[in-house]
Amino acid sequence: MPRLIINGTVHDLVEDLVTIGRGPDNTIVIGDSSVSSHHAQLQRVGKNYQLKDLGSTNGTLVNGTPVTETTLRFDDQIRFGAIDARYERDAIGSQPLSQIQKVEARPTELSAVPAGFTNASPFQSQRDKEDMVRTAILVGSAVTLLIFLGSMIAVLLMHAPPL
């Protein structure tokens, strides 16, 4: 499907008659004072569009040439008053949409991990890393506690009265 790009805005040309101008009743409204209220129209003729200037004040140019009526070709540069536009074919082409495929949803019980499944990743899981950190903290705390208790017993034995 052809399209008209005006100031970065893409207008897909899907109707047989497209009016262009500043007035709100146009198919494509251009809010610029250099554009007449009913500036131009595009009429589909076969697979192409015929551009017709509707007696605009500032005129219509196609590829730099003033026109009153012409058949547009893809990549034509159009100027409505002081506004530039480009007529081009749709980037993805005019192909029909593919058929929608039905997707069947399954309950979570059917998508559980199969028996005997093992993780093939060479990296440890996050849970394994957390267990290693917890174990290291626990071992470090136990060693610190044993050293503290040993030093307390040593201090008590040094100050204990002889038997």
Image (spheres, helix red, strand yellow):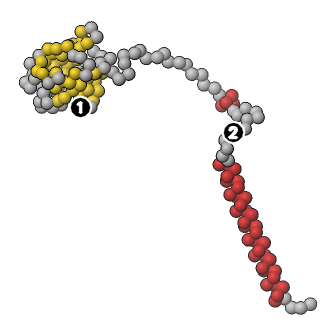
- The quarter holding residue 161 reads bottom right
Reading the chain from its start, which is encountered first: label 1 or label 2?
Answer: 1
Task: Give the amino acid type for the residue marked by disc 2 in the picture.
Answer: Ala
Looking at the rendered structure, the secondary structure element under dot 1 is: loop
Residue at position x 53%, y 18% in the image: 101
Q: Say what amino acid the circle numbered 1 marks.
A: Asn
Quarter of the picture holding the C terminus: bottom right
Q: Check if mark 1's residue and mark 2's residue have beta carbons within 8 Å.
A: no
From this viewpoint, is residue 76 visible? yes
Q: Quadrant of residue 105?
A: top right
In this view, the residue farthest toward the bottom is 162
Q: Farthest residue to the right: give it.
A: 163
Residue at figure coordinates x 66%, y 46% from the top left: 123
Q: Position of residue 78 (x, y in %)?
A: 18, 24
Residue that carries the numbered disc 2 in the rendered image: 120
Q: Looking at the image, which is closer to me, 50 or 110?
A: 50
In the figure, 81 relative to 120: above or below?
Answer: above
Residue at horizontal 70 percent and vertical 34 percent from the top = 113
Q: Residue at x 76, y 33 (%)?
A: 115
Quadrant containing the N terminus is: top left
Of 28 and 43, nearer the camera is: 43
Residue bearing the label numbered 1: 7
Q: Quadrant of residue 35?
A: top left
Marks 1/2: CA–CA distance? 53 Å
Q: Position of residue 96 (x, y in %)?
A: 41, 15
Residue 17 in view here: no
**Label of residue 101 in the image:** none
